[in-house]
Image (cartoon, rainbow, N blue to C red):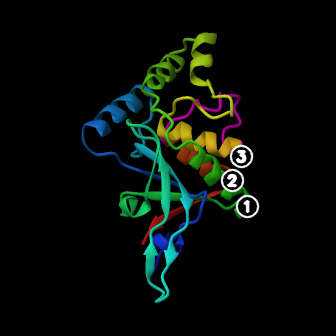
Amino acid sequence: MSDPDAVGLMDLQPGDIGFGPIDGAVGLFVGFGQAILGDDSRFRHVFVVTKAGQLGPNGLPAEAPEVVEAMPSGARVASAADRWSDRYVYVRLEAYPQEVRDQVAYHALQMAGTPYGFSDYLALALKRLGIRLRLLDNWISRVDPYGYPVRAICSQLADAACTRAGIKVFRDGRLSQDVIPGALFYQLLRIGGKALWPS
């Protein structure tokens, strides 16, 4: 019997939000940072689908969907085909119309090139330890003149794209960029997201 929540690569839509692992030394660094923040989920990486895949005239896939993801070298556009296995899951915010999810994709694309927020791990960890300083809040929530984060880890980029599209993911009074991957995944499900597993 097939899984009703399983999708094919070409079924991805703009605004879908992917979660998965990070391998190698970067994965170890990110895993350490998330452990400090109390995130024990298996997800280390978050990315936003910004472009649907394209079929060729023969009906076969011609172009894979694209994503925007925060990386140590800066946020970049990449192929979703490289993030397609049973190690990944995508969340579709079905509680919102596709027009709103298109805006999530649009705002994620505007953040391509954003530097990585290495220092945000420390700032977020200090907040988790109960250190409440305006300086920390200002550091975490800093934005450019267009309202986009000046630096971002992957979960911050995805959350900022949702916020700019009018989706308030967290409703507990936290700063819009006070977010880590595991918390983002479960909260997206709580506000009407549906988990989609690669078939």
Name the amino acid, label 3: Ile
Specify whether residue 86 is painted magenta. no
- Residue 132 visible in the shown view: no
Count of numbered tags: 3
Is disc 1 surrounded by few (<14), some (14 to 19) or many (20+) residues within 10 Å? few
Specify whether residue 177 is painted magenta. yes
What is the secondary structure assignment of the residue under circle 2? Answer: helix
| Residue 99, numbered circle | 1
- Going from N to C along the chain, the mark reached first, 3 or 2, is 2
**As drawn, 43 above or below 193:** above
Q: Which residue, given by chain and number where applicable, does mark 2 sit on? A: 103
Name the amino acid, label 2: Gln
Question: Residue 96: x and y, percent?
Answer: 73, 58
CB atoms at circles 2 and 1 under 8 Å apart?
yes
Q: Residue at x 50, y 50 (%)?
A: 68
Q: CA distance from mark 1 to mark 3?
A: 12 Å
What is the secondary structure assignment of the residue under circle 3? Answer: loop
What is the secondary structure assignment of the residue under circle 1? Answer: helix
Question: Residue 158: x and y, percent?
Answer: 56, 44
Question: Residue 171: x and y, percent?
Answer: 71, 36
Q: Which residues are magenta?
A: 168-181
Nearer-the-camera pick, 91 or 59:
59
Q: Which residue, given by chain and number where applicable, does mark 3 sit on? A: 167
Q: Is residue 52 left or right of residue 121?
A: right
Q: Where is the N terminus found, in terms of image quarters?
A: bottom left
**As drawn, 132 above or below 90:** above
Q: CA distance from mark 3 to mark 2?
A: 10 Å
- Going from N to C along the chain, the mark reached first, 1 or 3, is 1
Q: CA distance from mark 2 to mark 1?
A: 7 Å
